[in-house]
Amino acid sequence: MHLVHGVATTSESLGSPTFPKSMAQIFHPSLNTVSRATIFGAVFILGAAAFGWDSLLRSPYVTQVGVARDQPVPFSHKHHVGGLGMDCRYCHSYVEESSSAGMPSTKVCMTCHSMVWNDSEMLAPVRESYAEDRSIEWTRVHDLPDFAYFDHSIHISKGVSCTSCHGAVNEMPLMWREASLQMDWCLSCHRDPQKYIGPRDRVFDPDFHPFDLDLETRQALAEENRVESLINCSVCHR
């Protein structure tokens, strides 16, 4: 009670705010636990989704690593390279001079198969292609996106062997990708190319891999071939 000009007043009469002695709780305390669990669960789900998406992008389903592609003719590198000892350049004749390794014309195939297995049903598409003067529509196994540039000739001149990228083709009855061809795979070499360099006279040897040499030898070859670390975007994206 207050005394204003000799008149007794109360807080209520002066308009002072009043508060209830107790206020009912709107949310049950258990919702604190639910909210924490929800936040943690959302973070966990997002993390799991990101991990799953990354795993999918690196899986054979996307990269086609280890997946043999169907071809109009089941050409066997294991037979031609591993068994007969054919040099890569017999079919991929532009590989030392061009950005593309080149695909053999049907005339190259018929150089042998006009006399060898010339009645084979399996090689009927080859004979038809030759007779009609049209190319065989091979399914590309190593096919980079249009926004990525790759030059075979410069890699070969620097001592990068075929097996470094394509694997042991002499053991492949049907061709498949040995590497993902994704950007992080390319950069693993471009950041430290000395590890992947071999002698130029072993580039087309299917039994050779640069890791057969000790690191000091590879570094010496890299210096001899003037190999540099190139990670600028414009090297591959032109």
Image (cartoon, helix red, strand yellow):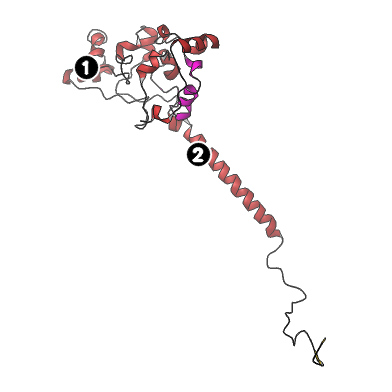
Residue 206 in the image: state x and y as whole percent: 42, 11
| Residue found at x 47% / y 26% | 187
Left or right of 43: which side holds 226? left
Residue on which the image places disc 1: 127
Residue on which the image places disc 2: 53
Q: Residue 116, located in which quarter of the rendered image?
A: top left
Q: Residue 234, located in which quarter of the rendered image?
A: top left
Q: Quadrant of the N terminus?
A: bottom right
Q: Which residues are magenta?
A: 176-196
Say above or below: 33 vs 114. below
15 in the magenta segment: no
Residue type, numbered disc 2: Trp
Q: Quadrant of the C terminus?
A: top left
Mark 2 crowd level (few <14, some 14–19, many ≥20, 10 Å Cα): few
Distance Cα–Cα, label 1 vs label 2: 45 Å
183 in the magenta segment: yes
Residue type, numbered disc 1: Arg
